[in-house]
Image (cartoon, rainbow, N blue to C red):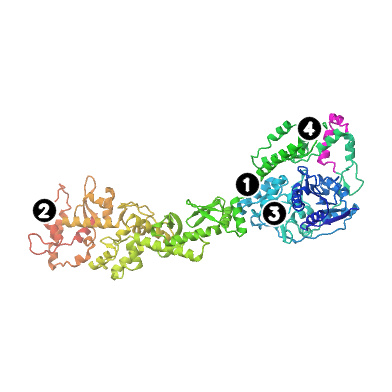
Amino acid sequence: MSELKAVLGPTNTGKTHYAIDRLMGHASGMIGLPLRLLAREVYDRMRAAKGDDAVALITGEERIWPKEARYFACTVEAMPVHVAVDCLAIDEIQLAEDPDRGHIFTDRILNARGTYETIFLGAETMRPILRSLDLPADGEQRSRFSDLSYSGPVKITKLPKRSAVIAFGSEEVYAIGELLKRQKGGAAIIMGALSPRTRNAQVDLYQSGEVDYLVATDAVGMGLNLDVDHVAFASSSKFDGQRLRRLSPAEMGQIAGRAGRFRSQGSFGETADCPVFEDDLVTRIVNHTFDPVDHLQWRNSDLDLSDIGHLMRGLAKPSGSAFLRQNPNALDEWTLRRFAADPEILASTAKPEITRRLWDLCRLPDFRKAGHEGHFRLVQSLHEHLAEPSARLSNDAMENRLERLSSATGDIPTLQNRLAAVRTWTYAAHRDDWLEHPEEWRENTRRIEDRLSDALHEALTDRFVDRRTTALLAGLKKDKSLTADLESNGEVRVEGHLVGHLKGLTFEPVSSSRALEGKALRHAAISALQPILERRLSDMATADDSAFSRGSEGYILYKDEIVGRLKKGSHWLKPIVELIGAKDTHTDLWQVGTSRLQVWIGGHIEKILPSLHGLCVGQNTETLSGVAKGYAYRLAETGAAVDLRADDHSARLEATDRESLKAVGVRTGRVAAHLPDAQKPAAQNLIALLRSVFDGVTCLVAPAGAGSFAPDSSWTDAALQANGYIRLGQRAVRADLAERLAWEVSKRRREAGTPVFALPPELASVVSCPGEAFPDVLKSLGLSIAEKDPESGVPTLWRYKSKFRDGDKKEKNRTSKPRGARQKKPEAARQLKSRHQPRKSKRRADPDSPFAALATLIDGKKSPSEGSATPTKTEGQGANAESERD
């Protein structure tokens, strides 16, 4: 008599492993499994141990049955129970309460036996019902190899590696998969709608470590052996074909139990929008204490197929047990009743063979998940061709059906729909009495299904996995020394994958539009990039100055790529350099690179601003006197020029001071001190950049090569002088040109020999000034208008407003005045007054006239006809009087 054993317990107890070992210990054996992919997994394991010829694989869609087969891996529905074997095992027997498939499991529990040993595998919740059915259920109770703990809610972005996210509905699964791709590199997808081959490929993607995350429906809870450390429920409700309902605690325990394999601890919790679990539910899942199964689905297996009426009455026959219940709404029974409602069908099923054929068609699985009505239409169309027992689908009929399904192009839903339809014809091909050439079509449908499955796997992988990132991560996990190649265009390839571009010392991932994905990619690739970065730093350290250049906004370039930026230092002429990139390289090399850039920028400043550099470092100011040294200091602080018009004239430069300043590059004059080499466009740009870095605001740059320009309100005096300009009226005039203009005006004054003198309009070209703005410029040099053209209003004569001409106080101090100078004052005043009487002519006075002699006297010079100087009124007195009238 067969020994009956129930091995019951939660997931991760080794139940299936134990049964397979027991089965292969006998001369023959058979195991029924809930899924085709599990049957394939067990088949491969037994074949490796017993050989190809000794093991058979039997499912509704696949049949490999060698003549000498002694061991059978099957789906529960496809088990050839008529074959006698020494040991028979049924896995996941708790599925006997499933409304659609449960009656098949119940039939196997009640009727399928091995000659010597029968093993039931399943949840502990089945023990009471087995006892109620008078089945020996006091067998081994197994405990988990690892503990299961509750970790609470966790954001998807914070989930630990080796996590499975449980969701329901393709839209939710896809949304989570895409999020994990962006943030974690990718995820495998497991759904019940996938073909076994696609599902296995996705499982391999996860198991291989190419991705660390899995997004699955409750299909993951049934027999899939996965290395999952954490199960996160994104939802706790599902649509079961009839209604949206919450998962039972036992179902949630089955799914959560996939966390932790063998001795590895597992955890579970919530994520996304899943409601937080109640304390009681958590306790039940952790302790595996669920409500016992109180009934099983049952169907009479002793059916009378003489006609459709007898068949339906046989299906409706009660079990006679309170623990065995019927489900009249099972898909196959519902489909049969739809056929029976047709009088023609009812009349045509008077023969047993016709009734058997109809019942076989009604039991076609709904691979398409089209619902009762949709599935009925498919069965109805088949019945039109196969109603007679002798009828077969021809090759032409199969080709027509499969032609539109064989294309492996399209998006994920399209491929899924084609696969589901092809699985229907794969199932049909394994019915020897449905097709003309079933052997041929088994091969054809399998080939089409494999091609579609592979295409679906690739489509899922392309959509939900970043292959570059996952390949790099997999290499790093294996402590593999990754090989990085740098192309001439800056492309970085690691193990042949394009991962990004190296710009200077900064790695930019190819997925820059997705910041988080790019971060993961950079993290994965950095170890492979390190040798390249270190080599580039070494090259920089020994590179010639010509390899470096200055970029905009304070950046420093090496071979036209940014490698550093300027930061504020102790002085605006002494910025410090910050290296950009290469943070993960050796500290010493990073410091060497930084030092090389610091040396280069110092040399660059000295080259473009030699005089300023000399003044700043102090090497050119040691021989300067106190006053001259003050001028040098002011220029080093200001930039290219200093406006001297407001200076205290008591601290005048001696000739020796001017020569000393000239020796260090400083020019001084009447209105400004300036540095000629700092007024060039390149120097102006560098000064503006250095001031911007130091001051923290963007500094203005004068128009390149401009002698003068009209500054707007944003130009301060300090900004002008930093560029080498001083403000003259409404114009900004370059300091050296302002000095030249002041010299030209003084020259015209001396040539005129009078306090009132003419200035030609052509002088405006000295400072590149428009004619209409030139009078304003002259006024800023201390001049006032002495006379205008009465018709045009254009100034014709000018005079100095200051008491001492040209501001030369020392010259006046050296001029002594005899006591008798006041005796001529009335006469001089009368002559001066006569100059401002209305004129009848615009002609100038004759040189031989008394006015010419008066000008000579006012200027403190000897008359050509006199042998000694005659004291007279000073120029400043006349100027002040004229200024008052103006």
Which picture quadrant has residue 649?
bottom left
**Mark closer to the chain start, 3 or 4:** 3
**Mark closer to the chain start, 3 or 1:** 3
Q: Position of residue 351 (x, y in %)?
A: 88, 32
**Mark closer to the chain start, 4 or 2:** 4
Say which residue label 4 marks: 392
Q: Residue at x 84, y 59 (%)?
A: 140
Identify the element where label 3 is drawn. strand
Q: Nearer the viewer, residue 655 or 52?
A: 52
Q: Nearer the viewer, residue 784 or 725?
A: 725
In this rendering, position of residue 645 left or right of residue 877: right
Q: Which residues are magenta?
A: 327-351
Say which residue label 2 marks: 847
Q: Position of residue 104 (x, y in %)?
A: 84, 45
Q: Amino acid at mark 2?
A: Pro
Q: Position of residue 344 (x, y in %)?
A: 84, 29
Residue 595 lies, with reference to residue 525, above or below; the image says below
Q: Nearer the viewer, residue 738 or 712?
A: 738
Say which residue label 1 marks: 463
